[in-house]
Image (cartoon, rainbow, N blue to C red):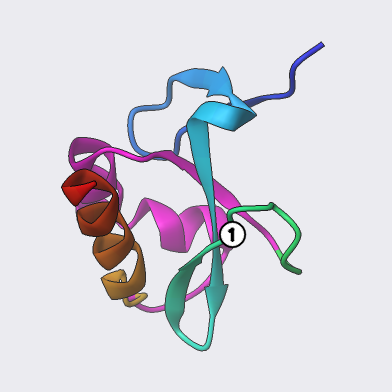
Amino acid sequence: MVPVRTCVACRKRASRDDLLRVVSSGGQLVCDDRAVLHGRGAWVHLTARCLNQAVSREAFSRALRVSGKLDAGPIENRLKTLMDI
């Protein structure tokens, strides 16, 4: 059985392989490709639409139970890199 997770932006359920795990580290959102970093994780589709929606709704802060705004720069850079390939 394949593990299923829910995207924090669109709330659609998908295979863990189709989503990106994101954790908070030092006030920044960090990609956790191998899903091994410590702490709570939030899952999001690796699309500009879902990423922008999650950032604008502050879904990452809620899902990760972090107060304040998180820097989404590292994830946005990652998305741009993947779209250029």
Q: In the image, what residue occupies the spot 52% across and 88% down? A: 26
The extreme front residue here reads 85
Q: What's the residue at 62%, 30% (across, down)? A: 16
Closer-to-camera residue (5/19): 19
Residue type, numbered disc 1? Asp
In this orientation, which residue lies closer to the viewer: 5 or 74? Answer: 74
| In magenta segment, residue 62 | yes
Task: Report x, y in % for residue 19.
Answer: 50, 35
Rendering coords of residue 33 (x, y %): 58, 54
Viewer can see residue 6: no
Does residue 82 lie above or below 40 as drawn?
above
Vertical arrangement, residue 77 with respect to residue 15, above or below? below
Q: Is residue 37 left or right of residue 13?
A: right
Q: Residue at x 27, y 38 (%)?
A: 47
Does any portion of residue 40 appear in the rendered image?
Answer: yes
Categorize mark 1 by other alpha carbons within 10 Å: few (<14), some (14-19), many (20+).
some
Quarter assignment of residue 15: top right
Q: Is residue 64 highlighted in magenta?
A: yes
Name the spot of residue 25 as percent of width and height, x first: 55, 80
Q: Given the current orientation, which residue lies at the most extreme bottom position? A: 26
Report which residue position mark 1 lands on.
32
Horizontal placement of 85 versus 62: left or right? left
Quarter-wise, where is residue 10 in the image?
top left
Q: Is residue 78 left or right of residue 38?
A: left
- Residue 6 versus residue 8 in the image, above or below: above
Indicate the quadrant containing the N terminus: top left, top right, bottom left or bottom right: top right
Where disc 1 sits, the SS reads: loop
Residue at 68% over, 53% down:
34
Q: Which residues are magenta?
A: 40-69
- Residue located farthest toward the right when viewing the structure as drawn: 1
Q: Position of residue 38 (x, y in %)?
A: 76, 69
